[in-house]
Amino acid sequence: MKDDAFKKIESVLYLPESEAAELLTPNENERRKRWVYCISQKMDDPLKPDKVLVEELESGLAGIFSPVSKTTAYRDIAAVQKIIGNIQLSAKNWYRYMIIEGAKKAYDLAKTNEDAKGMASALDKIGKYTMADKPDNDFDWDQMIPLDIEPSADPSLLENVEKVDNLELRRRELRALWKGDMQSEATDATIEE
């Protein structure tokens, strides 16, 4: 049921307010307003702390949407994360890209000016952010040796299994224990205050 509401709200998330209001219940439309607000905040500032968003959702932001409890605010943020993915990871990758591109330009500028220290510094930054100075973490598949297992129907090969004397008799005892009217052994419990 909750998943259906999520999909319903997600499908009309970016529609104009009037169109979304026709397709959603008033409660769902309120959730949609909060989600749109949170998404726009995360897009403007990917590193904005969730705690700040929770406080804003709790306050209602001067009538943009109705104030909600802290629990509801965290549920809204979880839904927003599900919709937009991990923006912090994207932001980190973007900053890494900017640093590398800046270091490339710094290297070109240092090379043009024949500045050996500047070139070395730029190359150091590029090496650090591309992790070129570290070995690749490729797994050596040759070290992975599959288990040598030979299938067998012989139970004597099993370890730590106790032998049951007169197995057929034990089976009959267990069947008799669980056979018959199970409800006759059950008793009703009385409710005590």
Image (cartoon, rainbow, N blue to C red):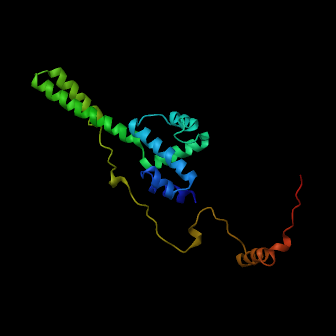
> What residue is rendered at 61% in x and 42% in y?
71
Question: In the figure, residue 181 lies in which quadrant?
Answer: bottom right
Identity of the residue furthest to the front in this view: 18
Residue 164's spot in the image, x, y percent? 70, 71
The residue sitting at 23% across, 34% down in the picture is: 101
- Where's residue 175, x and y in %? 75, 77
Q: How many marks?
A: 0
Residue 69 in view in this figure: yes
On screen, 94 above or below 172?
above
State the residue in front, 102 or 180.
102
- 90 relative to 19 in the view: left or right: left
Q: Nearer the viewer, residue 157 or 97?
A: 97
Is 157 on the left or on the right of 111, as rendered?
right
Nearer to the camera, 16 or 175: 16
Relative image position of residue 179 (x, y in whole percent): 77, 77
Query: Is the N terminus in the top left, top right, bottom left or bottom right quadrant?
Result: bottom right
Is 20 in front, or is 133?
A: 20
Q: Residue at x 49, y 71 (%)?
A: 151
Pinpoint residue 129: horizontal percent, then vertical percent: 29, 34
Q: Is residue 13 left or right of residue 186?
A: left
Q: Is any atom of residue 133 visible in this view? A: no
